[in-house]
Amino acid sequence: MIIASRFNGPPGTGNGGYAAGLVASHMDIGTPVEVTLRLPPPLDTELTVRAGDVLRVYAGAELVAEATAEAMTDDEIVAPASFDQAVSASSTFRGFAVHPFPTCFVCGPDREPGDGLRLFPGMLPDGRTAAPFVAPPDVSPVLLWAALDCPGGWSVPLEARPYVLGRMTALVTSVPAPGERCVVMGQMLGEEGRKAFVRSTLFGPAGDVLAAARATWLAL
């Protein structure tokens, strides 16, 4: 398993959601999977996947990630917004002014269209974030894990204190067709010390839930 350099989050390391999705792809992708990142995922490095009751991923002797089967419930879904509401919210994306990782594959404004996902989650009045997501030509379950990552993270005040993904549990039930207009929602649930707890949901063009996640982010 290799995380290509295109899929970076912080400079020199993998985007947390993409890395977690790639790890999860080695399990039953039709059920919820919890991935814990033990180290910043290295880029362009051969990673060894060892299956078992707990799937583990190593870079040499170093443990990078662990994955287990988990459970999710319907009450973990973030309330939706319309595509037009997401477009309007996206114009207020705080990362346009201050961004800890402006080349992030998912939400980096310095990435070129067609290279990064360029998801810019803006804040709604009630604290939820919303971003429009037009499915790219290479859309896949792993890319949906990535798309669920930063919209949840930006419900936390990332520009004031950088955070990175520590743990993510997600379920992808359907993959949109390339070009379909979707919406990604995020919501912060609370904080505890260095940890922030969030959830995120991807809605399809008809308002159906395509994927959902809960995550723990860690302040640097």
Image (cartoon, rainbow, N blue to C red):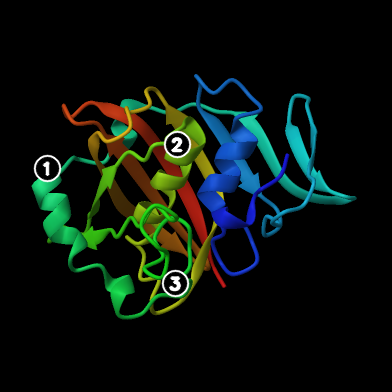
Q: Secondary structure at mark 1?
A: loop
The reply to whether discs 3 and 1 touch (Cβ–Cβ < 8 Å) is: no
Question: Mark 3 or mark 1, which has the lower sequence index?
Answer: 1
Q: Nearer the viewer, mark 3 or mark 2?
A: 2
Q: Spatial distance from mark 2 to mark 1, Cα to Cα?
A: 24 Å
Left or right position of 169 against 91: right
Residue 124 in view of the camera? no
Total number of numbered labels?
3
Q: Spatial distance from mark 3 to mark 1, Cα to Cα?
A: 26 Å
Q: Amino acid at mark 2?
A: Asp
Q: What residue is shown at x 20% (from left), y 40% (from top)?
A: 79
Which quadrant holds residue 58? top right
Reading the image, the residue beneath label 2 is 138
Q: What residue is shown at x 74% (from left), y 24% (from top)?
A: 53
Q: Nearer the viewer, mark 2 or mark 1?
A: 2
Reading the image, the residue beneath label 3 is 102
Q: Secondary structure at mark 2?
A: loop
Which quadrant holds residue 33? top right
Reading the image, the residue beneath label 1 is 82
The reply to whether discs 2 and 1 touch (Cβ–Cβ < 8 Å) is: no
Up the image or down, 121 lies above or below 31; here it is below
